[in-house]
Amino acid sequence: MRNLFNKTKQALAFFVIISILIINLPQVTIPVQAKIEQPKYEQSFYIESKSLDTRALILKEYLSLKDSPMQNNAQDFIEAADKHGVDWKLVPAIAGVESTFGKQVPGGTNPQNSSFNAYGWGVYGTQAIYFKSWRDGIYTLNQGLKENYINKGLINPYSINRVYAASPTWGEKVSYFMGDLDQYAQKYNKNLENSRLGDILSIRQIPVTPRPSTMPMLAVIAFK
């Protein structure tokens, strides 16, 4: 019995010592490398395609014939006119009268110095309104003509002439360029139609080789 008591006492002492050692052990932090997956995002790109208006093609060719520095802004002329409800030929025609289609403007045609004012808009002697670009001038003119002239009943070059320009022949000259541009547009459309018709007619048909007849031939026997 005494021997069993001693063994129990020894076991209890051993347990106490182990417990003390475990409690006093230093805490060790083991670095763990975790792989974090980045979320994947799908990027979508939308490109708006815009077809070039036929009138813009016509106007670009017309202005190129005039050696106009505004020929690459033909689409702007069309879109600005449509936006404000102005005849698309009016502003280009005014530019033809006032600056020979943009070739003679205050400040010159150099983009660094140019006023981009091809319309005599707000030009009084040496004073002139400067636009930021050809496009800026095009939109400003269409808006100004709509609000200050057309909405007040001045709807054609002759009536606009009374307020816009001092020269009594201004309206006649603007009308001339509008008519000239209209004739060019008609000719362009006619040539385009003829070209399309020619393309249709020029389609070569696949030659068809005639097949031998499968009908039996009748033998003609001559009796004497």
Image (cartoon, rainbow, N blue to C red):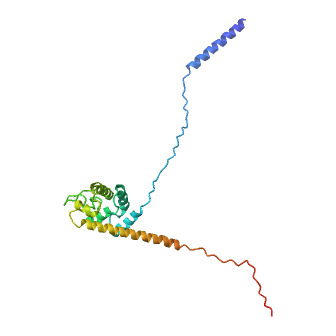
Query: Residue 29, image x and y in percent?
Result: 54, 28
Residue in the picture at 63% in, 12% down? 13
Query: Residue 15, image x and y in percent?
Result: 63, 15
In front: 6, or 58?
A: 58
In front: 45, or 75?
A: 75
Residue 183 lies in quadrant: bottom left
Query: Residue 161, image x and y in percent?
Result: 24, 62
Q: Residue furthest top?
A: 2
In front: 40, or 74?
A: 74
Q: Is residue 99 above or below residue 136?
A: below
Residue in the picture at 28% in, 66% down? 174
Residue in the picture at 31% in, 68% down? 177
20 sits left or right of 101 in the view: right
Residue 67 visible in the displayed image: no
- In the rendered image, the quadrant that contains the N terminus is top right
Query: Residue 180, image x and y in percent?
Result: 33, 69
Residue 179 visible in the displayed image: yes
